[in-house]
Image (tube, rainbow, N blue to C red):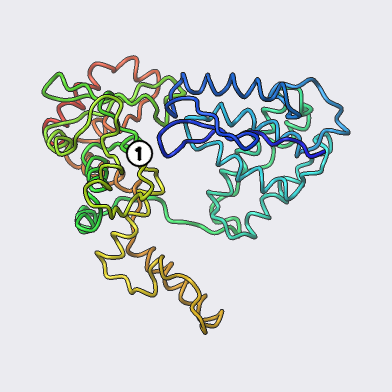
Amino acid sequence: MRRAKVPQFKRHNNGQGYARYNGKCYYFGKFGTPETQMTCQAWLAKVVSQADIPTTKPERVAKTNYTVADLVRQFLVHAQTYYADSGEAKNFRFALQALLEVCGRTAVGSLTKAHLREFINSLVGKDLARTTINSALRRVKHTIKWGAQNDLVPAEIHAQMMLVPALQKGRTKARETEPVGSVPVERVEAILPYVSRQIGGVIRFCLLTGARPGEALALTWSSINRSGNIWLCRPECHKTAHKGIRRTIVIGPKVQGLLAQFEGNGSQYVFSPRQSLTESGNDTGNRSGSDQYHYCSLTGAIRKGCEKAFDCPHELRIVALKQKRGESATAFADRKQRASEWRADNVWSPNQLRHTFATLSRQRDGLEVTQIALGHTSARTREIYAEPDISAAIDYARKWG
């Protein structure tokens, strides 16, 4: 009898969190909120108890029968709810799938450092970047650590796996990538005529506030305190929320003028693809009519805007990167290579906007204010300098934001 699969907690186009089980969709409320996560966790526990699905805290199992595949299956149940408010569960699935290809049927008690080295070599063979491989290795080690904490992996096996080092720059065959840098403001402004008003608003918001793209896409009217001359936005979900760090985005006059161009209230998203479709019916970022843009939608819109703004030859554009009738495999591979080189030289990513903000901020007001505006503070520093920090950020926003 086929074992039931673990239901996956996902974000629906309507903004709700849901899971599909036995052909039926179950909805739990607004995606990313603590209440929704708790509701989903309770439902998942009930499903797991009634079906042939391993629980996240099983009884100790025999080492000879318990395989890496079993460990991965149980960890993903845990990750599905533990990382429900981020994309980390997806990253774990990618890393662990590669691990299963190497040693999925191996008993956890028989794992050795050689298995992890084979895992690393398999990713190098797939031409993945060194940083991507190291991230995957870190997640595999975390899974093994979780297994040891729950008495699923022998402590000595965990200790051995932690000895496998990450790949060092210049000492491996893995592909190297350039670090994410800033993008010139002129190249940002050049694509604005070729993207929707909402996508343009997201781009300007990130450039003027230093907000992460995910923070801008999840921005709601209710998260903005508009009682003073300088507005304060405190996102419910952000990158460091699980560490107890409070994130504050300071909104000055320029950004206030930008937000005044958009309508909405309460829990509605400030930058909504549904509004874009209502206005034009031909949005370059999201055609699904959902209430919130996804990161991939923002990336795709920027890429298309760059292709139009910087005159990308039509045969090199993403929409045309399909093998034509009569085109040889060699010619198609050459065209894909030329397209990749063109994008590397001309297309920028949403994350570069934050780097541009940091560069301009540091030139104008120094490193300390830049760190404050970006939210880069340790817990101890935050406790000591909380009041002076927010004052400095407000002064910066008054002048530049």
Q: Quadrant of the N terminus?
A: top right
How many marks overall? Answer: 1
Q: Quadrant of the C terminus?
A: top left
Give the vertical position of 335 relative to 50 (above or below).
below
Give coordinates of residue 388: x percent, y percent: 22, 19
Numbered disc 1: secondary structure: loop
Q: Residue at x 31, y 65 (%)?
A: 307
Give coordinates of residue 165: x percent, y percent: 64, 43
User: Hey, which quadrant is residue 104 in on the image?
Assistant: top right
Category of crowding for the residue at label 1, using alpha-carbon neighbours closer than 10 angstroms: few (below 14), some (14–19), many (at least 20): many
Q: Residue at x 31, y 55 (%)?
A: 284
Q: Residue at x 72, y 35 (%)?
A: 4
Give the vertical position of 59 relative to 337 (above or below).
above
For this orientation, the residue located farthest to the front is: 24
User: Hey, which quadrant is residue 22 in on the image?
Assistant: top right
| Closest to the observer, 301 or 18 | 18
Give coordinates of residue 256: x percent, y percent: 14, 33
Amino acid type at circle 1 is Gln
Give the vertical position of 242 relative to 88 (above or below).
above
Give coordinates of residue 123: x percent, y percent: 63, 54
User: Hey, which quadrant is residue 282 in on the image?
Assistant: bottom left
Q: Which residue is mark 1?
A: 292
Q: Going by the image, does 172 lie left or right of 271? A: right
Q: Residue at x 71, y 49 (%)?
A: 117
